[in-house]
């Protein structure tokens, strides 16, 4: 009798991602570096995971996004929050679901639902308020390629 093992790629490998029904799903696994002395995920990792999921979405959804940053575009996280709902432990499979709450001229809000991919248990819900600025820090309108990437995830649309 053989056993089939399901694997989730490491950070160095390609990630599993999907855009389905106004959400982006990013999956990862909890590793030893994510945990504290008690064996559960260190609370600050939740913010790092939000950032990883956000960056992966931009990489996937905005073609040539690096060119926008070369022009001096800065995405500034001006507010971030996380409400902790449950614990994750070593080698748990994690699913991070991103949605967009709203989009304005120069800012947008991302929402993050972090859950155990196998049990569906909610681990954290959070949000980030992000503004767009030029190289001098002056607020600018969201560039069209980023706006186009955000609209399919927007819950208000």
Image (cartoon, grey):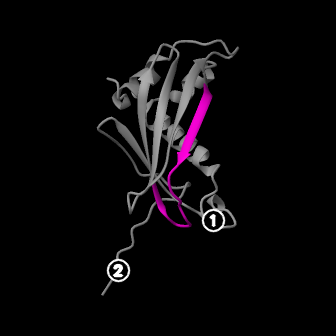
Q: Quadrant of residue 38?
A: bottom right
Q: Does the magenta segment cover residue 128?
A: no
Which residue does the numbered mark 2 point to in the structure image?
A: 3
Total labels drawn: 2
Front one among 92 and 66: 92
Residue at left offset 70%, top offset 14%? 136
Read off the magenta span: 76-94
Q: Does the magenta segment cover residue 85?
A: yes
Label 1, secondary structure: give it: helix
Which residue does the numbered mark 1 point to in the structure image?
A: 32
Circle 2 packing at 10 Å, graded few (<14), some (14-19), many (20+), is few
Front one among 37 and 31: 37
Residue at left offset 53%, top offset 15%? 106
7 left or right of 48? left
The x, y position of residue 33, in whole percent, is: 65, 61
Compared to residue 52, the image places residue 108 above or below, namely: above
Label 2, secondary structure: give it: loop
The x, y position of residue 51, in whole percent, is: 57, 40
The x, y position of residue 64, in whole percent, is: 49, 28
Compared to residue 154, the image places residue 39 above or below, namely: below
Residue at left offset 61%, top offset 13%? 139
The x, y position of residue 32, in whole percent, is: 63, 65
Q: Nearer the viewer, mark 2 or mark 1?
A: 1
Query: Is the N terminus in the top left, top right, bottom left or bottom right quadrant?
Result: bottom left
Front one among 56 and 67: 56
Front one among 13 and 86: 86
The answer to whether the residue labelled 2 contacts the one labelled 1, judged by CB atoms less than 8 Å apart, is: no
Q: CA distance from mark 2 to mark 1?
A: 25 Å
Circle 1 packing at 10 Å, graded few (<14), some (14-19), many (20+), is few
**Residue extending farthest bottom:** 1
Mark 2 or 1, nearer chain start? 2
């Amino acid at each position: 009798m053989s056993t089939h093992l399901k694997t989730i790629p490491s950070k160095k490998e390609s990630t599993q991602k999907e855009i389905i029904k106004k959400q982006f799903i990013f999956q990862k696994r909890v590793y030893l570096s994510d945990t504290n002395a008690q064996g559960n995920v260190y609370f600050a990792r939740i913010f790092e995971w939000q950032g990883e999921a956000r960056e992966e979405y931009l990489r996937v959804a905005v073609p040539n996004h690096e060119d926008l940053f070369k022009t001096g575009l800065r995405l500034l996280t001006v507010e971030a929050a996380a409400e902790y709902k449950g614990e994750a432990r070593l080698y748990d499979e994690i699913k991070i679901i991103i949605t967009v709450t709203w989009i304005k001229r120069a800012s947008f809000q991302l929402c993050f639902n972090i859950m155990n991919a196998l049990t569906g248990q909610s681990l954290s819900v959070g949000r980030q308020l992000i503004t767009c600025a030029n190289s001098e820090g002056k607020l600018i309108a969201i560039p069209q390629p980023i706006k186009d990437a955000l609209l399919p995830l927007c819950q208000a649309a």
